[in-house]
Image (cartoon, rainbow, N blue to C red):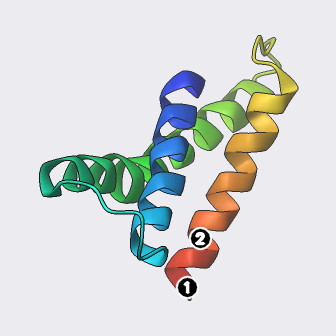
Amino acid sequence: MARLAIICNVFFILSLMIMLVKWFKLPDFLANFIAVLGLEMAPVSNICFVIWLMGLKFTKQSIDIPKWQTILIVFMLMVQIAAAIL
């Protein structure tokens, strides 16, 4: 779950670069693929990860995910929420 969220977050950053930086041009099929993974799949995977993580915390089960991955995913979720509001 964490690997999928991190991969989708990388595509989210790439899709923001495609939208904001004019010289960063890609073929249409590749830009569409990156947009689907980044703009649509990343928030869904991050929300699912946070819900899964909260479930593990509430049931007091051990979490075998490195802290940097958890921090990165929660931070990217906040960035995505801020991007959706703006």
Q: Would you identify the image quadrant in which residue 18 lies?
A: bottom left
Q: Position of residue 66 (x, y in %)?
A: 81, 19
At horizontal 71% and vertical 37% (from top left) the residue drawn is: 54
- Furthest toward the bottom, the residue is 86
Label 2 sits on a secondary structure element that is: helix
The numbered disc on residue 81 is 2
The numbered disc on residue 62 is none
Q: Is residue 31 left or right of residue 6?
A: left
At horizontal 41% and vertical 76% (from top left) the residue drawn is: 22
Residue closest to the eye, 81 or 57: 81
Residue closest to the eye, 52 or 76: 76
Measured along the vertical axis of the image, is residue 33 above or below residue 79? above
**What is the C-alpha distance between the residues marked 2 and 1?**
6 Å
Q: Position of residue 46 (x, y in %)?
A: 55, 45
Is there CB contact under 8 Å for labels 2 and 1?
A: yes
Measured along the vertical axis of the image, is residue 43 above or below residue 59? below
Measured along the vertical axis of the image, is residue 62 above or below residue 37? above
Measured along the vertical axis of the image, is residue 4 above or below residue 30? above
Q: Is residue 86 left or right of residue 23?
A: right
Residue closest to the eye, 52 or 22: 22
- Furthest toward the left, the residue is 29
At horizontal 47% and vertical 53% (from top left) the residue drawn is: 14
**Amino acid type of the residue tagged 2 in the rendering:** Ile
**Callout 2 environment at 10 Å: few (<14), some (14 to 19), or many (20+)?**
few
Number of disc labels: 2
Label 1: which residue? Answer: 85
